[in-house]
Each structure stands twice: as C-alpha cells, then as structure tokens.
Image (spheres, rainbow, N blue to C red):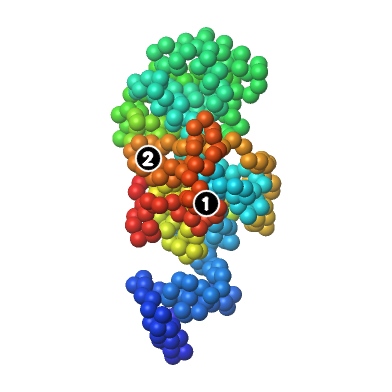
Amino acid sequence: MDVTPAVTLAVIAAVADRSRTGRAISGRFVSVEPTRGGGGPGTVADMLFGEPSRPVDPAPPFTVSVGGRVLRPTSVFDTYWRFAAERQAVYLARLRRSPLPWTTDEVIRSHRFTNVFRASDRVSQYLITEVQRSPSSSQEPADVVFRTLLFKIFNREDTWQHLEAAVGPITWRTYGYEAYRAALDEAAARGPIYSAAYVMPPPRLGEERKHANHLRLLEQMMRDGLAGTVRSAASLESIYKALVSQAGLGPFLAFQYTIDLNYSDLVRFNENDFVVAGPGARDGIRKCFGREASGIEADVIRYMVDTQDQHFHRLDLDFPGLFGRALHLIDAQNLFCEVDKYARVRHPEVAGISGRSKIKQKYSPGATLAAPAFPKRWRLESNVAEMVSGVDHRDGASVEVDRDRPAIVGAQVTPRGVPSEDCPLPF
C-alpha cells in the first residue's frame, strides 16, 4: 500500500513519543493493511506497539490459499480461534479449582463442549491412565491393542469397570467370548453400555445383539494379526488403513481409534502426520469457509494447525496450548466439530451441511478434575506438575493449598514454563 506523508509523520510522532517514555521499540515487522468496512486497525502507535487505545477486532483475511484453492473465510473463522482460546481457559480454570464463573461466554457456560485438546477430555484421560497405563495392566502389545479397542468400542468408564469386575484383568490371552458376552448382557440389562459420543453401527457377524457382534469383530481383528500390524506400522495412516478395512468401522471411527492407539507407548507417531475429517468437522469447515472447501477438508485442518500462531496473534488471543503443546491435526479437527455446534447459537445465519440449529447437551459444573496425564513422549509432565502444584488433586479434593498463586479466570493467564510466541512449541 502507498504510505502517505500523513502516515509517515504519524509514525515519526509515535516513535518520538515512545522514545520520550524510554520504551524500546519492538523489532517485529508491522504490516499496515486496510480493513474491510472502511475502518482502520487503530492508530499508528497502536499498530507499532501492540497496545491499542481502543478494542481492536480485525476482520478475517479476505482470502486464504489452501489445497490449491482460494477460500474466503466467513465470520465463523475468527470465532474458531476465539472459541479455542476461551474453551481452553475454562479447562485450565477448572484444573486450578478457580471459582465460578469460569467464563463470561453464555454459550460456553450453558452448553456442553469437549475440551480443545482431545487428550485432555475425560474419556481420553481414563483410557490413558486406567486402560493403557494402569500399574496392573499388561503391557504386552497384543493386550495394549485389545484393551484399547475394547474400551473404545463402548467408550464408557462404567462399562469397562463392570467388565473388569466380572471377568478380572482384561487381556487378550485370557479373553473368552462367553464370559465377556455374559458380562455385557448383564450390564446392558442395567442401562446403556455404549457412549452417545459416537454412532456405533453394529457389524453383522452372526450374533443377535450389537455388543456380541462387536466382540466378534474384536476377536476377528486380533486373530487376523492387528496387534502385529500396529506394532510394525510405518505411519499413522497405515494403522488407519488396517482399521478402516474392518466391518463396521468407517473412516471416522477408524481414525479416532488410530489416535487412541497412538496414546499408548506401543505407537509413537506424530499427530501431525495424518488426519481424517469426520462429519462434524466437515460441518464446521463448511461454516468457516463455505462450499469451496468441500473435498479438501484435510488440507483445511492442516492450514489451521500451520497458521495457529498467526491467527491467535492477529486476534490478540492468549492461547497457552496444552501445557506448552500446540494444536495438532486431531485437535483442530475436533475443534471444527465443536465450532459447528457453537455457531448454531452464535452464528445461526451461517449454514452448515447437517442443517442442525440447536445444541442438544446442556452443561452444568460436575466433578472436579484430576491432575491430567499424557503420552510420555510429549514430555509435558513438568509443565503439568507446575500448573497443578498449588492444588490438592487427591481423591477429587478441591482445596486450594497455595493461595498466593493466581487463579486462571480467562484467556489472559498463561502458566509459567509455557513457550512464548517467539519459541516454537514442541510436538
């Protein structure tokens, strides 16, 4: 853009003004671009020093280039980043036992949304700590694969606990179809044994009941050598291909199970290697980019991961990540699902694919959060320990034991030990 004499003088005046205060000028290059609607981004001093004299709400970029196409972001695109920052702030506030309210966003306060980072969700935490890494759990490769998939088929802690109580330690070596089927029959007579999070189509393998057919499917996968395939896999995608070929496992479930296996110590791939967009994510992508994004959803998800720092900075959002871990492909994919739901209330005028207009699940504060655990290779233990060091997490206690540490009450508080924007976040 052309720089007018007035702008040049304003820059000089701003520099002179800051020089009088003794403040150093940042070496960051500032690109001054016109915004839509005729409004400017603020004073020149604001643009130079990043301290606006009035709230700045920059519009989404005119266009972005993704997967060889030019896409025009909608208003929901910026909502994606704002939702991510606010929802993560709520998670950290809960973890720190901060007092209510954890957010002023009425949509987030009133409705149920998953965490920004998939691994921090309740069921993923149970999978990591109780199914895969429990001290009493066998770490034999076949047992890790068997236990992970058995748990995820039902995706409910109470179903897993009932099975363990009925059959004892769950291993592939000691598995018996009749005992497991009988235990699941008993559990099903008491109430739901499947989570409502996923639609679980029953495979047709000769049994009358859905859970019995799922046991047969798991038997078939294990006897066909799935554990060996997982252990020797060269990539996340190769595990996905082995799973998606199974009866009753479509692309979405196969990808989710691939990520679940990757939480274990048996598999050690980077979550940025591969992604599959599920139905909810495709809905969210449609709302953020319109019809032009159809067919390149994986590229769009990768674009969000690759440019996250740029957009959090552009919107002046403080996003600490997951104890220093940046958004990965699975997280960006899941975020599109949640933003699809959020936009039904916040942006009802923006159409998706499904046509749904309401968020079904309401939220009410539940149990306190235990100190989280993540795959060891992520090396987050020290940051997690520092974050929760002032809170007693034993037996679900909710006692603040160090009241001198600040509580996280919004997206502005960053835990110590988290890399700054000038330091690349670890995978």
Using the image as rendered, state which of residue 239 and residue 119 is in the foreground: 119
Label count reads: 2
| One can see residue 342 in this view | no
| Residue type, label 1 | Ile
Residue 22 versus residue 147 in the image, above or below: below
Which labelled disc corresponds to residue 381?
A: 2
Earlier in the chain: of badge 1 and badge 2, it is 2
| One can see residue 408 in this view | yes
- What crowding class fits label 1: few (fewer than 14 Cα within 10 Å), some (14-19), or many (20 or more)? many
**Quick check: marks 1 and 2 in contact, CB under 8 Å?**
no
Residue 319 versus residue 111 in the image, above or below: below
The secondary element bearing badge 2 is classed as: helix
**Along the horizontal axis of the image, is 256 left or right of 268?**
right
The picture quadrant where one finds residue 13 is bottom left
Residue 412 versus residue 234 in the image, above or below: below
The secondary element bearing badge 1 is classed as: loop
Which labelled disc corresponds to residue 376?
A: none
Residue 259 percent coordinates (x, y): 43, 36
Residue drawn at 52 percent across, 42 percent down: 400
| Residue type, label 2 | Glu
Residue 94 versus residue 230 in the image, above or below: below
Residue 148 percent coordinates (x, y): 44, 26
Which labelled disc corresponds to residue 408?
A: 1
- What crowding class fits label 2: few (fewer than 14 Cα within 10 Å), some (14-19), or many (20 or more)? some
Using the image as rendered, state which of residue 374 and residue 370 is in the foreground: 370
Residue drawn at 38 percent across, 59 percent down: 421
Using the image as rendered, state which of residue 351 and residue 132 is in the foreground: 132
Mark closer to the observer (1, 2)? 1
Residue 83 percent coordinates (x, y): 56, 53
